[in-house]
Every structure is written in structure tokens, then in C-alpha cells.
Amino acid sequence: MRRRTVLALGAGVLALAAGCGTGDPPIQREIDFVVPGPSGGRSERIARLMKAVIERRGWARTVGISSQPGGGGALAISRFFAGGRQSDLMVADPALVAVAAMDRTRPLASGTWPLARLAGQWEVLVAAPGSRFRTFEDFATALLRDPSGPKVGGGVAGGADHLLYGLTAQGLGADVRLLDYTAFADCAQAVAAVLDGRMALGFGAQQDVARHVAAGRLRPLAVSSSERLPGVDAPTFIEAGVSLVYANWWGLLGSRRLDDSQRDALLDLCRSVGESAVWSQACTAQGWAPMYLAGEDFRQWLTAESARTKQVLTGLGLL
């Protein structure tokens, strides 16, 4: 089978694990985590964990969290661009990058101060045990024969699961415009649709599919990490013939109103959180991988990620 190679490093080839730390950061007077979209999602969970770490270490006097629903994050972006407070830290993820692209706003990397990427979770392509798709090769062959054939489910339109499916199809050389993708409100609903046969396959986070895989209720076909995942008997996309590494990541963006000294202090805060043992332990408990990348390196990565996201969204017909 002839396949095109598209290198898409959604979380970097290697997750950067916590280091040994270099001292405490300057104490912040106030921090307010801005969570785009409705409350209760993983971005809010990230914010709450960071709040707990910062409060535990005494790195800020006041730490708040505010959810800003509306347009799936579009309202939060417009408010942040218009004049976010110096104490505001917006939680970013692939869905927010997609919202910025679909809303025709400025790319996040130029409208904010990208501070750091902190964590993420790997994705798994799964099928029901009785599915005709026994291996990733079966899926790839069917997709190339008829891109609209396989019925695939996942999270919200333009979210990490949807983007990953588009990148997978691109890597295989399939026509992205023809994909049959059903968006669900969350991964649990997508997994349920695969379990009951409504969907032939689904993309989901490792932590969301792990118990079903362990119980034999779902068959993993491929994983989006650079190396095989413990407890998941499936090849990486790279091993399966698609040069693709991708994660649903979370990071922090600062307001453009920050001056150099304020930005440096917040970068020190992100470093201290990302390198702390308590953050590493929290990520392990949640099934997340530490993916620390900060400052100019994060800005360049986010710029490239925004461009790739826009290109994939165009292929999917969302732009």
C-alpha cells in the first residue's frame, strides 16, 4: 500500500518530563485561570490542578478560576485579545486553536503571550471486538478505497479527535473532504457509540478507553504516541506506516499587556509547576503525560500547530 508521509508532531516527538527544578518563582499577587467554554471539562480540571499546586507551594496570594462559555471558546478569545488582565492566564488546547482558526481571529501565538505547554494525553484508535477492522491495516485499506466508508466517532467537531482523524487520513493519502466523522459531546459518548455498534471506530484518550480495552470490550488499532503505550497492545501510527505523533495537550497563554518582567515571572511560575514533583504525580494520577515546553520554543511550536490546524480544518470543510 502506497502512503504519503505527513509528519504531524502535535505534542512533540518526545514528552518532556519534569526536571529537578531551579528554585521558587517570584510570588504572584493574583492569578486567574481563564477556561474557555463551559465549565466541567478537562481544561477546567487542568486549571484546578494548577491552582492546587500553586496554592500548596505558596506561589501566589490569590488564585481564581473563571469559565467563559460562548462560541466554544470564541467569546473568551475575543475578550482576551481585547484586553485580558495581566493576572489572566488562558488555558489553551487543540480545540481552542481550532476555534481561533474557524472564528477568523488572529492566531493565538500572535494575539497572546504563549507561556508554556504543560501536559497532554495520547489518543487511541479503537474498534469493537466484532468489527471487520481487525488491524490498522484493515482500516487504512478501507479508508483509501472509500474515505466515506468507515464510520468514525470522536469528540466535538474541530477538537483533538477530529483533527487527529484528518491528520491520519492525510498521512494515508485519503481524501479528507469525504471522511464520515460523527462528533459527540465527549469521549464517553463516542466510546459508547463504538460499544453499541453505531460507530465502526472511534478516537479517544487513553484514559477514557483503557478500562474497555483491558476488559476486551474495545480493540485498539493504533496509538498516537511516539512509543507504544503500557497496557495497550497496538502499534504507534508511525509503526503502522503514518508518520504521525499527536496529543490532546494543554498550555497557558498570557495577555499581550504583560511587560517583559511580568512575562518572565510567569514563565518562572510555569517552569516551577512543570518541574515540580507534585505536578508530575498529579499528571500520573490523571493519566496525563507531562509535556513541558515554554517561552520562545512554545511560541514557535504553537505557531506551527496553528498553521497545521488551519490546513486540516480547511480539508475537513470547516474553514
Image: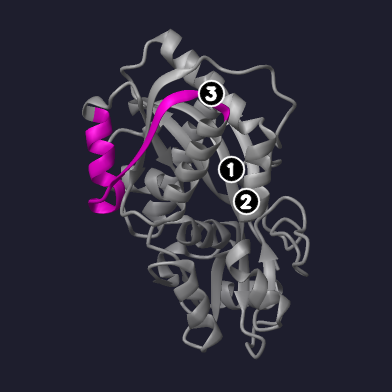
Question: 245 left or right of 159?
Answer: right
- Of labels 2 and 1, earlier in sequence is 1
108 and 8: which is toward the camera: 108
Q: CA distance from mark 2 to mark 1?
A: 6 Å
Residue 131 sits inside the magenta stretch: no
Secondary structure under tag 2 reads loop
**Residue 254, quarter of the rendered image:** top left
Disc 1 crowd, CA 10 A, few/some/many (<14, 14-19, 20+) = many
**Of tags 3 and 2, which is closer to the observer?**
3
Residue shown at 54% from the left, 62% from the top = 169
269 and 83: which is toward the camera: 269
259 and 280: which is toward the camera: 280
Q: Which residues are magenta?
A: 57-81
Q: CA distance from mark 3 to mark 2?
A: 20 Å
Q: Position of residue 102 (x, y in %)?
A: 30, 48
Q: Position of residue 105 (x, y in %)?
A: 27, 37
